[in-house]
Image (cartoon, helix red, strand yellow):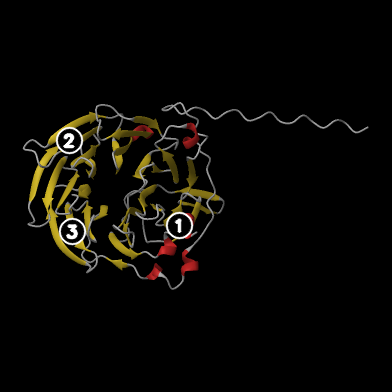
Amino acid sequence: PPPPPPPPPPPPPPPPPSPSTGLPFPSLPLLPFAPATMDSFAGGSSGAQVELAQPPSDGITSSIFANTTNNLLVTSWDATARLYDSDKNELIHTFEQKGPLLDGSFSLDDSKAYVGGVENKLFMLDLKVGSRRELGSHQKPIKCVEYCAATGLIFTGSWDQTLKLWDPRAHDPLSGSYELKGRIFSMGLTGNRAVIATSGRHVTVFDVRKMSEPEQDRLSSLSNQLRIVRCFPDGTGYAVGSCEGRVAIEYFDTDPNVQKKKYAFKCHRKTENGAQTLFPVNALAFHPIYGTFASGGCDGVVNVWDGFAKKRICQYPRYQTSIAYLDYNKDGTKLAVTQSYTFESGERDHPSDTVFIRPISEKECKNKLARV
């Protein structure tokens, strides 16, 4: 008689618990996203982008659309904050600082802008009259500046490992200061939550109504330095990108059934002659209507992803150098793509730093659920 069949293999061990929440990761599986390219969009908006006139003369650190118009605020290592009318492709105003600027944000009504950088100082810019006011400072450069619509305060994150809150209406603007676990690299706000990515792969979540202690303190499932964090438009979670060419999708709700939905995937990678190059993910931007998101990396590529269907919607033709920043306008009909070398390969000659305004059609951003 034939020998009996071998016994079935033992079941795999359970996933390790998260160091921050005690919930399983569940290994955050790296999912293969279905490929798509702009080839299927021939004749669409892929060739209609416009390069901003009079761009900064040095590396561009942020390019943020206004809340109510298509004006664009651009900060740069050339120590300027520039305000553009992207519809007319005109430079409206240039604010000159003493040191490079690393980030900026508009007030809710777009009458003011807030910028910070290597001077360690936070400035309020009056966009109507062209004046500026110093609100306060950190001990080290300010990396992140965000206006919080829920509180009317400005949140700043610094390499001095502190998060500070500022009230521009007060005589003494400093409203709070909070020590975090590492240097602050990126910050995103949604509703009543602030999400801060720091060195050491920490992600700290605050409820802006109760800042006395963090709501959550997580250790990212990504195994290398975090570069960028952005929140879902519906406020249920966030995406974080790292220098290893990966993006992780995370959810705030700690219910185990919700946590099962989180995952990570590989992107911004290139294989040549059997060797794979991993490019940092510098930029993420969520579409304000459909909740799909764009990612940009040091490979000069912009991908648009449907995170719900786990599919890449499209990939734009490669830009000449690193993608440093991405931002959709208020209704998602435009995408500001910042092409600016981020020195991932050290000092070398590189293409000019500039911002492209790309018109967006529905087929470039609409997710699978919205198409049904």
The residue that mark 2 highlights is 138
Q: Is residue 370 left or right of residue 190?
A: right
Q: Nearer the viewer, mark 1 or mark 2?
A: 1
Q: Nearer the viewer, mark 1 or mark 3?
A: 1
Q: Which mark is residue 370?
A: 1
Q: Nearer the viewer, residue 217 or 77?
A: 217
Image coordinates for residue 167, horizontal then vertical, percent:
14, 39
Residue, x 55% and y 54% (percent of image)? 273
Residue, x 48% and y 55% (percent of image)? 369
Image coordinates for residue 185, horizontal then vertical, percent:
30, 40
Q: Is residue 354 left or right of residue 318?
A: left
Within 10 Å of the Cα at label 1, are there few (<14), some (14-19), or many (20+) other Cα atoms? few
Dot 1: element? helix
Callout 2, which amino acid?
His
Image coordinates for residue 231, horizontal then vertical, percent:
35, 44
Q: Which mark is residue 83?
A: 3
Circle nearer the N terminus (1, 3) = 3
Callout 1, which amino acid?
Ala
Within 10 Å of the Cα at label 2, are there few (<14), some (14-19), or many (20+) other Cα atoms? many
Q: CA distance from mark 1 to mark 2?
A: 44 Å
